[in-house]
Image: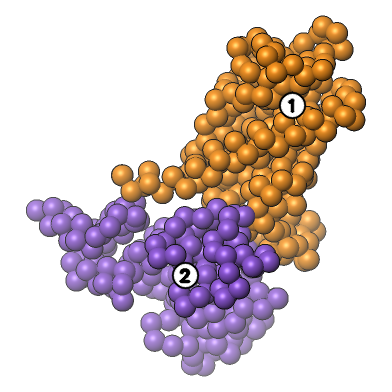
Chain colours: A purple, B orange
Amino acid sequence: MTNREIVIPGEIIVEGEKYLPGEGTERRGNKIVAIRYGLAEESKELVKVIPLSGVYHARRGNAIIGSVENITFNGWQIDIGTPENAFLPLSEVPGFVNKNSLDEVMNIRDSLVAKIIDINKRGIDLTIKGKGLGKIDEGIIMEINSNKVPRIIGKEGSMINIIKTETGCNITVGQNGLIWISGDSTENELLAKKAILFIAEKSYIEGLTEEVKKWFEKEKK
Amino acid sequence: MTKKDFKRSDGRKFDEVRKMTAKVGVIPNADGSAMFSFGDTIAIAAVYGPKKMHPQHLQNPEKGVLRYTYHMMSFSVTERIRPGPNRRSMEISKISEWALEPVVMIDKYPGTVIDVHVNILQANASTRCAGINAAALAIAHAGVSMKDMVSSVSIGKLDKQLVVDVSKDEEDYEEGEGATDIPITFTDEGKITHIQVDGSIETEQLKEAIQLARKACKEIYEVQKKALKESLDINKNK
């Protein structure tokens, strides 16, 4: 199998003992069967299905954008759009925090950029220790389908860099589909938002990077 | 017994399914959605989730919950039906839920709920089958893990004659033994996940009915497969 191909649940992707079932697939006898809808891909005998739709599936190491849902005695409960509970413990916040007034650091409904450090049975653990992570103070937050995030970022960040240079905005893309845009003027921020919505809508077109460059030329006139 | 040259009121052959159409992604707001129709019977399904189950006491820490709601639009039949749940729709919801549960891998989503809303826009018999077909498409479209797809069809027994995909006229057949309605759901592998018999049928003929349904479900499966595979090409042309 050379090309990527759309598969549906229960469909046989490849036959043969040498293949390994990856994400979204299952071994049945000597067959590798898809268990979800998406694009089947095979590399080095590992077969996996890349999802095209559905809710965000949390993975360790993902940078995400969420908002504070609740404050407990030792941390913050964060809504990141997953069915599991996400928790930011006090120990994962840099600097000194007064244990009696956690709301001074982050209050309910505040937004933040965080990273997933662990996923276990209890839920998801987050951290804001690291570069680019922390509370969001200004700018706009928009939402797209989480499956379109790789297209917004592009190959090695090519797509997102075009938007950044064209609009002069700082853009942080959360893997859960939330995007934080902050620039020096609202017009630029809105232009960046429009560009992202354009990419999300046309996400299956080939040569999208060129299209986006053309789109910016047209918009700036 | 079953005659091969039996003429039906709408001119179909005894083993002919009405014209089927299927489309996925009809509801952009939902995580997954689909439309499926058998001739005049149109069902649309929307899937939300897996999402956190509320109220919390309904959560199951071992496996997720599949929640299916079947609803007929008040304008779906000539005589207006009162909207809202009733005895019939609650029964069909439960039955359809059981038809889908064996294939949806709910054990992968503990503490969550997968909401499936099925609405019948237009009814001309076989609504639960159209509903299950649409729901299977929508669940797959929502990216939920499934062991297999399911396809559903209704077999009718008009007096002693077996027919595939019953229409309203046939459902009301009154001559001889009257009409028996047998909705059956198959996985692609050919396993039965749901079978109902509304009326009376002999064992031998029931076996025959299952064979007919199995053949029809193969056709339905192809329609469903095509709908899912072509949903992306539509996006390409935008």
**Residue B131: where, in percent of width, then height?**
65, 35
Whether residue A18 is visible: yes
Residue picked out by circle 2:
A42
Q: Is residue A71 above or below residue B215?
A: below
- Of all residues, the one furthest to the bottom in this rendering is A96
Image-based side of A53 in relation to B130, left or right: left
B102 vs A42, nearest the viewer: A42
User: Which amino acid does the dot numbered 1 rest on?
Assistant: Ile
Give the quarter of the figure containing the N terminus of chain A.
bottom left
B65 vs B213, nearest the viewer: B213
**Residue A189: where, in percent of width, then height?**
27, 62
Image-based side of B220 in relation to B178, left or right: left
- Of all residues, the one furthest to the left in this rendering is A221
Q: Quadrant of residue B20?
A: top right
**Which residue is at 58% across, 21% downward?**
B40
User: Which amino acid does the dot numbered 2 rest on?
Assistant: Glu
